[in-house]
């Protein structure tokens, strides 16, 4: 297998013509008389453009570029663009899902011939796959962004992207795609019914998120070094958060109730995560061993049935999907109405708005706009009813 190299193509002399030449992606570019300043400047310019387009061939004909080739190049760009803490973000996974339909039905078609009708056909396939209307509109937007990126990289003509923008999005109430209900707050009684059946660490994650109104990802990455305990109300500044790339600050205030939940998890390595699957698994095994009825002198010994090299091991940090699935499994097993960690944020936002107003809810949830807070905190219709009772 050839060894990969980061070296740049060399500035060479073409003996037959006396010109300087450089080979980029298998194609020779003549730069002018060898050794002149103008040829050196031309070499620097071509090398800069070649590196800017990811070491891809320069001046490729846009008429020959297929949709599959455009998807491959965009996915390579997106893989390096949508990364946080060394891991691909959820947007990267969504982009792959959105482009899957395009590559399935239009991989061999030239990108220059991909128009609004083709995009509409892709959307119809998503409707047939029973995707939600909001998911379809988001996927169509991601496909448009791929062609916009292709325009910026001089891979696609600008009129191709502008033609795709002309396709209007799906609207609710038209019966074109499956519609979903908005995310509602989860009732505290439902949460309390779930907590006894959850692992202790996951239950504490639920209690902490309910008390603070933070995002599920912010619960999973909580570390002792991120918590300032110098005041009566602690301040938790996550290492990373959802809107970090916008330059926004995120501070989560931890009150007495949440402090009682998280205090025992802060007595550990400051850089270690507070809520860890390894601790939960160790506690589960210890409880299983304590409840053992067979004497240790009989039967299997602790650890006899464990695989030496298991394919999956408990990690040192909870992923948001693992956190969500742990709750969903308990709800399905014990017949509890299913709910997700995101609904805890809605519940906290609604309660704060009811008692302290929408501005307090906005600050606690970490929103920059009141309109975003309106999504996460339900309006207090009881207040409107009281106004109508007294005024009307």
Image: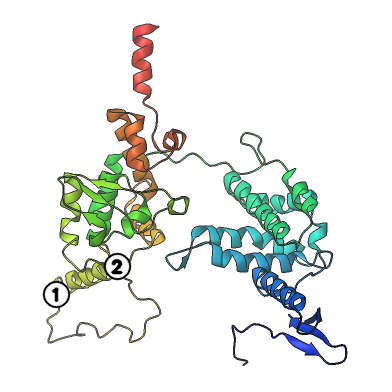
Q: Which residue is mark 1?
A: 293
Q: Residue at x 35, y 32 (%)?
A: 359
- Decide which of tag 1 and tag 2 comes sooner along the chain: 2
Depicted 53 relative to depicted 206: above or below: below
Where is residue 244? Give x, y as percent.
43, 53
- Cα distance between the residues tagged 1 and 2: 26 Å
Where is residue 126? Give x, y as percent.
66, 52
Depicted 280 relative to depicted 236: above or below: below
Q: Residue at x 71, y 50 (%)?
A: 124
Marker count (numbered): 2
Choose between 133 and 51: the one closer to the eye. Answer: 51
Where is residue 348? Give x, y as percent.
31, 40
From the viewer's perspective, is 372 left or right of 219?
Answer: right
Q: Quadrant of residue 200?
A: bottom left
Q: Residue at x 58, y 49 (%)?
A: 135
Q: Residue furthest toward the right?
A: 17
Choose between 51 and 11: the one closer to the eye. Answer: 11
In terms of secondary structure, where does tag 1 sit?
loop
In terms of secondary structure, where does tag 2 sit?
helix
Where is residue 344? Give x, y as percent.
34, 45
Residue 252 can be seen, yes or no: yes
Q: Which residue is mark 2?
A: 277
Q: Residue at x 66, y 49 (%)?
A: 127
From the viewer's perspective, is 320 left or right of 132?
Answer: left
Quarter of the image where the N terminus is located: bottom right
């Amino acid at each position: 297998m050839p060894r990969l190299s980061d070296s740049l193509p060399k500035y060479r002399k073409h003996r037959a013509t006396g010109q300087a030449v450089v080979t980029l992606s298998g194609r020779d570019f003549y730069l002018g008389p060898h050794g002149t300043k103008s040829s050196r400047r031309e070499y620097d310019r071509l090398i800069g453009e070649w590196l800017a387009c990811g070491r891809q061939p320069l001046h490729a004909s846009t008429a020959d570029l297929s949709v599959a080739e455009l998807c491959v190049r965009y996915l390579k760009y997106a893989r390096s663009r949508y990364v946080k803490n060394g891991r691909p973000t959820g947007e990267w996974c969504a982009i792959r899902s959105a482009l899957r339909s395009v590559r399935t039905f239009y991989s061999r078609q030239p990108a220059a011939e991909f128009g609004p009708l083709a995009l509409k056909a892709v959307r119809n396939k998503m409707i047939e796959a029973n995707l939600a209307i909001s998911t379809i509109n988001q996927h169509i937007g991601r496909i448009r962004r791929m062609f916009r990126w292709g325009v910026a990289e001089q891979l696609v003509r600008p009129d191709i992207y502008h033609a795709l923008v002309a396709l209007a999005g799906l609207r609710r109430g038209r019966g074109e795609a499956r519609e979903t209900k908005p995310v509602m707050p989860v009732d505290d009684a439902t949460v309390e019914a779930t907590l006894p059946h959850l692992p202790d660490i996951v239950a504490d994650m639920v209690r902490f998120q309910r008390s603070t109104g933070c995002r599920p990802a912010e619960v999973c990455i909580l570390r002792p070094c991120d918590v300032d305990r110098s005041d009566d109300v602690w301040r938790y500044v996550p290492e990373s958060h959802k809107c970090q790339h916008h330059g926004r600050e995120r501070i989560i205030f931890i009150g007495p109730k949440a402090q009682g939940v998280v205090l025992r998890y802060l007595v550990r390595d400051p850089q270690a995560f507070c809520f860890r699957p390894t601790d939960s698994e160790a506690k589960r095994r210890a409880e299983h061993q304590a409840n053992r009825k067979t004497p240790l002198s009989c039967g299997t010994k602790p650890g006899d049935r464990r695989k030496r090299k298991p394919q999956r091991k408990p990690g040192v940090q909870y992923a948001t999907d693992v956190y969500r699935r742990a709750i969903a499994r308990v709800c399905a097993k014990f017949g509890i109405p299913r709910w997700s960690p995101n609904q805890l944020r809605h519940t906290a936002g609604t309660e704060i708005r009811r008692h302290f107003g929408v501005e307090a809810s906005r600050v606690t949830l970490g929103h920059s706009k009141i309109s975003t807070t309106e999504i996460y905190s339900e309006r207090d219709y009881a207040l409107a009813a009281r106004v109508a009772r007294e005024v009307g």
